[in-house]
Image: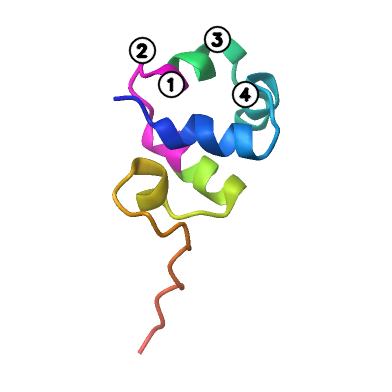
Amino acid sequence: MELRRMRDLREDHDLSQQKVADYLNMHRSVYRRYESGERETPVWVVDRLADFYKVSTDYLLGRTDDPAQPSPLKRR
């Protein structure tokens, strides 16, 4: 599954694949395969990228067009 927003967010922030791969502590070729959809993107990568770009995982996955991160759940 290609996560189109992975590429869009990276390009919107003027980042190279190498810079994002360095943040994720992986080789650029591995990140490139995630971005292109050649490899399944692990959940931990989606989670870290959502934090990095300050968007929700649902936005990154294309489940919503609202990039806002949800508020943390409040305990009762």
Residue depicted at x 61% and y 46%: 52
Q: Quadrant of residue 33?
A: top left
Label 1 Cα neighbours within 10 Å, binned few <14 / some 14-19 / many ≥20: many
Amino acid type at circle 3 is Ser
Q: Nearer the viewer, residue 70 or 65?
A: 65
Label 4 Cα neighbours within 10 Å, binned few <14 / some 14-19 / many ≥20: some
Label located before the other in sequence (3 or 2): 3
In the picture of the structure, the residue carrying the numbered disc 2 is 38
Label located before the other in sequence (4 or 2): 4
Q: CA distance from mark 3 to mark 4?
A: 9 Å
Q: CA distance from mark 4 to mark 1?
A: 10 Å
Amino acid type at circle 2 is Glu
Image quadrant containing the C terminus: bottom left
The image's mark for residue 34 is 1
Q: CA distance from mark 1 to mark 2?
A: 6 Å
Q: List x then y, in percent, for residue 24.
A: 60, 30
Q: CA distance from mark 1 to mark 3?
A: 9 Å
Label located before the other in sequence (3 or 4): 4
Label located before the other in sequence (1 or 3): 3
The image's mark for residue 29 is 3
Q: List x then y, in percent, for residue 42.
A: 38, 30
Asked if residue 43 is among those painted magenta in the image, a careful observer would answer yes
Residue depicted at x 44% and y 55%: 56
Q: Is residue 45 above or below residue 55?
A: above
Does residue 43 appear left or right of residue 68 in this picture? left
Amino acid type at circle 1 is Tyr
In the picture of the structure, the residue carrying the numbered disc 4 is 21
Q: Nearer the viewer, mark 4 or mark 2?
A: 2
Q: Are marks 1 and 2 in contact (CB under 8 Å)?
A: yes
Q: CA distance from mark 4 to mark 2?
A: 16 Å
Q: Nearer the viewer, residue 72 or 35?
A: 35
Which segment is the magenta one? 35-46
